Image (cartoon, rainbow, N blue to C red):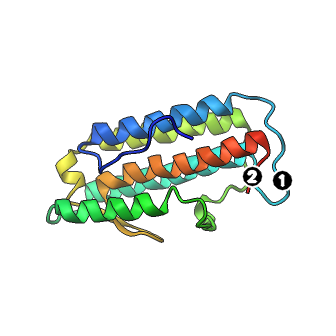
Amino acid sequence: MLNQPLFSAPPASIDDALWEADRVRHLILSEAENPNFPAPPEGKWSIDDLLYHLHLVERGSASAIRKMIESEKGERFSDESIAKTWQRMNAFVPNRNTKILAPDGVAPKDTPSRAECIRLLSESRERLKAHCSKTTTDDLLRISFPHPVLGAIPGLLWITFIAMHEARHLEQILELKTQTIV
């Protein structure tokens, strides 16, 4: 439902990756402005739960990126390795036919108000950008951190993961808006 697809190739730079993450975030926040979202079907997350989940994932990802930046740098991932990881991510993350339970650390519990969730999303994005401002694209391509399902993801692609993950949930938000959750 995005007007433009996500990256058609891995991002070339931190700026490219952050631009895409900001583009998707803007679309999510535009949808979240509706104060009269319908209640979700039984057992499904509300819009506020989804926003809070996105914050928790980004906060954790930003922390992982900070740890990667502070770690010893290895060999630069080859372009082939980056392309393969990106293809694996692009095939898996946006595919909502593949259901995955959110790990405890990122599952929404005691979800705050929508206004607080939006504030927290802004806070986690600023933290991500602050960490990224302290490194280079090349350094982010010399480090990785494991994803529980996708395996090791180079630092630069973690930013892309955030954008893809948020786009996946944007689709869910749009379905919730029209009460057609599958």
Badge 1 element: loop
Most foreground residue, 39 or 107: 39
Quarter of the image for residue 68 reads bottom left
Q: Quadrant of the C terminus?
A: bottom right
Give the residue at x 47% y 50%. Answer: 164
Give the residue at x 59% y 36%. Answer: 28
**Dot 1, how many residues are within 10 Å of its Cα: few (below 14), some (14-19), or many (20+)?**
few
Foreground disc of the pair 2, 1: 2
Residue 63 lies, in percent from the top left, at 42, 54
Q: Is residue 156 above or below residue 74?
A: above
Residue 51 lies, in percent from the top left, at 64, 44
Give the residue at x 42% y 44%. Answer: 6
Q: Are marks 2 and 1 in contact (CB under 8 Å)?
A: yes
In this image, 86 relative to 51: left or right?
A: left
In this image, 142 relative to 181: left or right?
A: left
Residue 45 lies, in percent from the top left, at 74, 53
Quarter of the image for residue 129 reads top left
What amino acid is labelled 1 in the image? Pro
| Disc assigned to residue 181 | 2
| Disc assigned to residue 41 | 1
Badge 2 element: loop
